Amino acid sequence: MNDRNKAEARNGTDRAAILLLTLGENEAAQILRHMSARDVQRVGAAMAKLSDVSREEVTGVLNEFGSDIERHTSVGVGTDEFLRRVLVNALGEDKANNVIERIHVGRSSKGLETLKWMDARAVAELIRMEHPQIIAIVLAYLDPDQSAEVIACLPANTRSEILMRIATLDGVQPSALTELDDVMEKAFAGKTAARTSVLGGAKAAANIINHLEPSMEGTVMEQINTSDEVLGARIQDLIFVFDNLLEIDDRGMQELLRQVQSDQLLLALKGADEGIKDKILKNMSQRAAEMLRDDLEARGPVRLSEVEAAQKGILQVARKLAESGAISLGGKGETYV
């Protein structure tokens, strides 16, 4: 693989890291200021791991960036449309819509944004005594993976209620969000500004549940279904489960399999339907597929908890690859953003 092809093969996060490293410190800092805490951490980690990047590979990344700019800023294409296309390509449809909303209404939450940089236990300690509705709004504002970590630190008997409140949120009034941001500001010496919000909804709850540990996910969903069967069904329809991997195209599946450990894959397939087994085996080399079949037949009974943990681990890898733009998740599984 030549250097130009290497540049094209890198995922979106790595290409962004290469682009930032080619800029001066001030310019890179200005760009990072406009990114979320999670995205800064993700790109920063990629920048730290980069090594042996050739001049030709850097040129390939810069040429690709330049081509994108030229393609999306031709006569007749407005700024809004350009912004939307760039963000959808980078973040996916759902997350891009949320970011666009924040840009258009001038959102610049300081107090709430501070929470994104905090450890999950510290966030949980800060909000645990608040009303469940306040906790729900805060968790709907944070990224799903961080919210899942915070949920895990909250008392078990409050988790399902908070997730149900997130699922039934239908936006937040500007005055309410400003007031909440003001409370956070006083704690972190930030500044506030009025804003609107489209926080919450069944998809937001599903995003968080997707990041919970398997045992906790099962308990929470059982409690939600007991309290509100209809709401539980809506959330369940949006949760990204192992069988949703069927909707990944072959190229994406091959990329996913390169990132998954063989022992983890073996455990995950012990409890999988034939359809997903066939999908995975089809995207392996003949020799690797035969070895996996033999291992599946030879492997004795395994605990359901081990199977669920392995499947959850693979789903987390799939979501990370999707977030970086390396693969595309189809259907209802697109709740990771």
Image: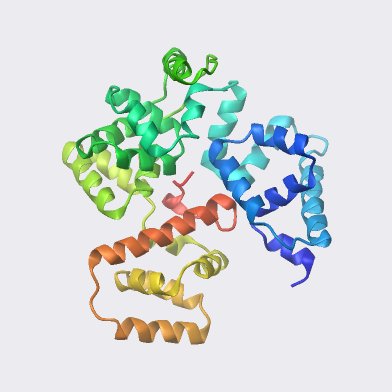
Q: Which residue is drawn at 73% across and 45% down?
A: 20
Quadrant of residue 148 within the rendered picture: top left
Residue 167 lies left or right of residue 89; in this view the side is left
Coordinates of residue 275 in the picture (x, y in percent)? 37, 71
Direction left: furthest residue: 226
Q: Where is 270 relative to 118, above or below?
A: below
The quadrant of the rendering that contains the N terminus is: bottom right
Residue 12 visible to an observer of this rendering: no
Name the one closer to the observer, 68 or 121. 121
Q: Where is 124 relative to 105, above or below?
A: below
Q: Residue at x 82, y 44 (%)?
A: 70
Residue 208 lies left or right of residue 233; in this view the side is right
Coordinates of residue 308 in the picture (x, y in percent)? 30, 62
Residue 143 lies left or right of residue 107; in this view the side is left
Q: Where is 244 relative to 2, above or below?
A: above
Coordinates of residue 177 in the picture (x, y in percent)? 44, 18
Q: Residue at x 26, y 49 (%)?
A: 216
Quadrant of residue 81 within the rendered picture: top right
Query: How are the colours assigned in the image?
Result: rainbow
Quadrant of residue 200 within the rendered picture: top left
Coordinates of residue 25 in the picture (x, y in percent)? 76, 38
Residue 134 lies left or right of residue 191; in this view the side is left
Name the one closer to the observer, 317 or 79. 317
Q: How many labels does the image show?
A: 0
Q: Where is 283 relative to 9, above or below?
A: below
Residue 185 visible to an observer of this rendering: yes
